[in-house]
Image (cartoon, rainbow, N blue to C red):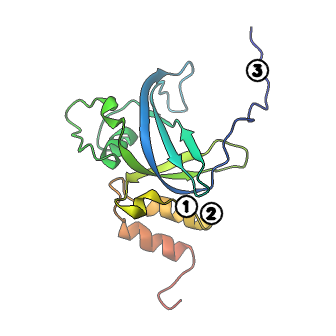
Amino acid sequence: MTVVTPGGNADVPVIDDGLYQATVKAVKDIVLETPDTWGNSEKVEIQITFTDTDGETHQLEPRVNFKWNERSTLFAIAQACGCNPDPNTSFDTEDLIGKRVAVLVETLEEGKWPRVQKWAKAGKGKAAQQTVPAPSQAATVASASVINADGTLDTTAFWKEIKRLGFTRES
């Protein structure tokens, strides 16, 4: 029997929390040996690459459930990639390869792997080539919760978040 020891975080990338313009490089279907918390074992691993504010290229491989409907993460990713998906027809995940997408990357705990928290449509033009580092943890959490999957602002969530952060119209 193989014994696994803790401390295998040597190759965990250090990436500043922020919004990055990424490219989908590969998509792979995987089956987990042990199902996740909700009993799902079929996943889609989406390999993305992006460049941070220091010019360093990073690669992440987030996994999402192998489910297809209007509320699924995979459907939201397809929308963010500009694939114009239909929840009532089959979707070939390989159509994501080569697509540009904006990703909100956060490291929730020091020493842990960074996570893609939100997917949105990639920007266009010169601005799309720049990354936007997160100014603070509170702002990062706020930005994650107010961006819709299609990249538009959820104004109701935006104003709730502004209020939660303690801002008022008089501030």
Image location (x, y in percent) of residue 66 = 39, 29
- Residue at the far bottom in the pictured view: 170
Structural distance between the alpha carbons of marks 2 and 1: 6 Å
Write the residue at 36% across / 35% down.
97
Instruction: Name the kind of residue labelled 1 in the image.
Output: Val
Mark toward the start of the polypeptide (1 vs 3): 3
Write the residue at 68% across / 39% down.
12
Depicted 144 relative to depicted 91: above or below = below
Image location (x, y in percent) of residue 169 = 47, 87
Image location (x, y in percent) of residue 71 = 34, 44
User: 126 or 166, which is in the foreground?
Assistant: 126
Q: Which residue is mark 1?
A: 141
Depicted 112 relative to depicted 159: above or below = above
The kind of secondary structure element at disc 1 is helix
* CB under 8 Å between discs 1 and 3: no
Q: Which residue is mark 3?
A: 4
* CB under 8 Å between discs 2 and 1: yes
Structural distance between the alpha carbons of marks 2 and 3: 33 Å
Q: Which residue is mark 2?
A: 137
Instruction: Name the kind of residue labelled 3 in the image.
Output: Val
Q: Residues within 10 Å of mark 2 (few under 14, many from 20)?
A: some
Taking 28 as reference, is 16 left or right?
right
Taking 70 as reference, is 37 left or right?
right
Instruction: Name the kind of residue labelled 2 in the image.
Output: Gln
Depicted 113 relative to depicted 42: above or below = below
Q: Quadrant of residue 134?
A: bottom right
* CB under 8 Å between discs 2 and 3: no
Q: Residues within 10 Å of mark 1 (few under 14, many from 20)?
A: some
Q: Residues within 10 Å of mark 3 (few under 14, many from 20)?
A: few
The kind of secondary structure element at disc 3 is loop
